[in-house]
Image (cartoon, rainbow, N blue to C red):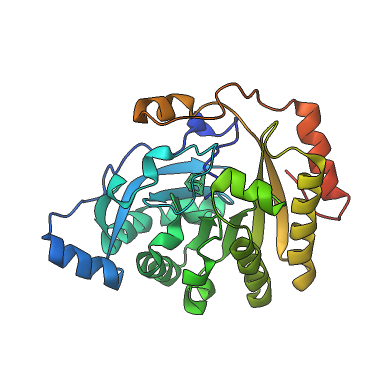
Amino acid sequence: MTTCLAPLDAPSARRAGAGLRGLATTDVERSERLELMRSGALGSVHSWELVTAVDGPGTRMTVFLSGCPLRCLYCHNPDTLAMKDGGPVLAEDLLARVERYRAVFAATGGGITLSGGEVLMQPAFAARVLRGAKERGVHTCLDTSGFLGANATDEMLDDTDLVLLDIKSGDEETYRRVTGRPLAPTLAFGRRLAERGVPVWIRFVLVPGLTDDPRNVELVAEHAAAIEAVRPGTVQRVEVLPFHQMARDKWADLGRTYELDDVEPPSAEATEAVREVFRSRGLTTY
Ligand code: SF4
């Protein structure tokens, strides 16, 4: 979700993290692995990293889970889209690592963010990690497109302190063009989060010639305002992320066709004008 497009000023302007360092990958038989994955004890994880000022408040351990049902044209993590792109990681090993950073999280108001790929491809694993983090008093965040929102149980949402919800386009046709999938599940998930009182940061990637049509932007703002209207205070901020080209080499390395090769990032003025569209609806933007 993920947005998978780091703000340009993000540390290392990465997506996804540096690897699985320090997380024991387990060598288990295939049949046992499937059983462990079903129970949520084991997940397929691409990488993790420690970041500040992205992926939620404070210093965060962002964990990139493998697998995603979307195929966003601007995906910054094309190397996380298949489940096989990750390595097997036990939830308890991940939580042991979370435990190590508790003091850092407490001092900075940070916590753990589950990202991807799409975190809700592995709901049992995500639920177990979220529960374990809450038991340790750690702030939890999901970074998701919301397309698989139906996979999130109510219990899982009760263990989620914040959702970074990508609305990749406001207009149905553009959403399909960007992601290859329909928009409705994302909006339904947004409404459900508001109904359950889960705070949301909405993210929108501004791509010239793809998502920047004024009507499309208006519709994203309309959807964001509609979620906020369900329960005022839900949409704590809208992050408008200017497209950049830092994933181009990854696509080339994977031998995949990258349609946005010639697209230039939006100007600062154009990005600011889009933020103003959200502000005019009373939403806070970054
Ligand atoms: S394809 Fe998946 S991982 Fe890539 S940007 Fe889209 S939602 Fe994120």
Above or below, 252 relative to 134: above
Residue 49 horizontal side relative to residue 22, left or right: right
Residue 82 position within the rendered picture, expressed as x and y whole percent measured from the top left? 34, 48
Residue 158 horizontal side relative to residue 97, left or right: right
- The residue shown at (70%, 31%) is 208
Who is closer to the viewer here, 126 or 255?
255
Who is closer to the viewer here, 132 or 203?
203
Who is closer to the viewer here, 87 or 91?
87
Residue 4 position within the rendered picture, expressed as x and y whole percent measured from the top left? 52, 42
Q: Quadrant of the C terminus?
A: top right
Residue 42 position within the rendered picture, expressed as x and y whole percent measured from the top left? 26, 63
- Residue that lies at the very extreme toward the right in this rendered image: 280
Residue 50 horizontal side relative to residue 144, left or right: left
- The residue shown at (35%, 31%) is 254
- The residue shown at (26%, 55%) is 89
Residue 8 position within the rendered picture, expressed as x and y whole percent measured from the top left? 60, 30
Above or below, 105 relative to 126: above
The quadrant holding residue 206 is: top right
Who is closer to the viewer here, 227 or 78?
78
- The residue shown at (54%, 30%) is 259
Tally the marks: 0
Q: Is residue 224 visible?
A: yes
